[in-house]
Image (tube, rainbow, N blue to C red):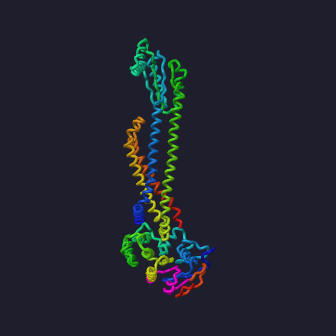
Amino acid sequence: MLTSFSRIIVSGWLHFWRNIWLSSATISVLFLALFVAAILLFLGFTTTHIARILEDKVDISVYFIPEISEENILDVKSQLLGFQEVKNVEYVSREQALETFRERHKDNPLIIASLEELEENPLRASLSIKAYQASSYAAIAEFLGSESMGSLVEKVDYRENKDLIERLFTITGNIKKAGLVSSAMLSLIAVLVAFNTVRLAIYNEKDSIAIMRLVGAGDWFIRGPFIVQGMLVGFFAALLSTLAMVILAIIFSERLNAFIPGLNMLGYFKTNILLFLAVEFGGGVILGSLSSFIAIRNYLKV
Amino acid sequence: MVALYNVTFLLQPREFISIVGRSGAGKSTILKLLIAEEQPTSGTIIFENQDIAALKHHQVSHLRRRIGLVFQDFKLLYSKNVYENVAFALEVVGAPPQQIHDDVPQVLELVGLEDKARNFPHELSGGEKQRVAFARALVHRPDVLLADEPTGNLDYVNTWDIVKLLLKINEFGTNVVLATHDKDIVNHLKRRVITLEKGKIVADEQKGKYLI
């Protein structure tokens, strides 16, 4: 049993190297399949990242009537924080708002001058609320617009931005869906191409398989070396694909970060290294050996 | 359309039979039936109290390990060298490494290829390829050797080398079944001859001659 096993491995190994041209052709196709998978993994990460950036930009602001005291506002804040859906509430006092306003328009003397004309701070204290999920904003806005709040709240600017926010969430949702669908399709194509390449490689060996049968080789003794070969092909394809991805990450990580802020390609691969290697090497070895296993079935019936 | 019709014969231990006939007479079909590569539409083929026609897929492998096979087109494994081609027949039966190490060179010496062990089939002549095939068919000491037109692709000198080899193998005690349409060989052998015509046995003679 053990000798058979080692003979199968040795035979697969020898066959792999003796037919290195055929092996490298198969490796290159499998490499493309795995490389596509690696890129798709990364694109999936990128789309989630972009969607998160866009979603992070969304919040609801409530502006309070100037006479309302800070305690009342902070009371509303703690009420809001009590909701499960709410991620974060930020209080901006009238003075802070004025400060920010001045800071933003410090280069515009006309605005600063007209601000000086006013006796009273024209700005309102506000709370800006972020929710975990886009769908929660409508409910939060409803709570803020309810009658009990009517005496405190001057304006909720969700209603004004409602269309914009909803459209933004449709877009990010679509980005995610499109990413999933195109990943699934491209993966399917890659798998089919790889599988058929292995099938052709084994078709090339159908005479040898028939001869082995005639000499009295059992199914596993014939199949084994081809599966070992498939594994080797998958392994080397995964190695190449991983190397290519690492090189790409080193070259483009900074440029991508400049293009999409906060997107760290190199960091992504570092934190997800186990998932990435599992997809590449697991995928490669399984694809290679399973394709061999399926492709060889027809020729074993002799 | 039937390839063989009512063919019955008994192979005695250590016997050397030639099966002769024109192309398409059914010689190869008999050999294919003997290794369960083809199934008879009716009738039985008994090898040591076992009906070959009734064997299951995995039992067929076991049957073939007890039979040596040689073909007109050699049927060597082209990605393996001479040594590995011969060793393959032993690996298949699960022989221990030591036996392979001892027996393969011995058989290669018997067929006169000891210095070509590391060559690949494409580097050999037709006669050499056929001798590799014989070495592979013999190394696991089969009970029966089936040879289907083994000299069909060979020149005169190589043909007689193969005939001598067949006789030597038979002397060691192996049954030999030779399918051929080479008149000279058959007449030279003076062994049992079964003559086929259109799928029927027309003659079965001890010390026979090529009739057709």
> In which quarter of the view is residue A109 placed?
top left
Counting from the top left corner in percent of width and height, residue A62 is at: 49, 23
From what the image shows, is residue A15 above or below residue B46? Answer: above
Looking at the image, how many numbered discs can be counted on the residues?
0
Residue at image position (43%, 76%) is B127
Residue at the outermost front position:
B155
Q: What is the magenta range?
A: B168-194
In which quadrant of the rendered image does the N terminus of chain A lie? bottom left
Q: Position of residue B106 (x, y in %)?
A: 38, 76
> Residue sitting at 42 percent across and 69 percent down?
B122
Tell me, yes or no, if residue B151 can be seen here: yes
Residue B68 relative to residue A270: left or right: right
Q: Position of residue A8 (x, y in %)?
A: 42, 64
Residue located 42% across and 59% down the image: A21
For the question of whether residue B84 can be seen, the reply is: no
Of residues A2 and A20, the one nearer the viewer is A20
Instruction: Tell me where residue B120 appears, x and y as whole percent.
Output: 40, 69
Closer to the camera, A120 or B155? B155
Q: Is residue B153 above or below residue A133?
A: below
Position above or below: A57 against B195:
above
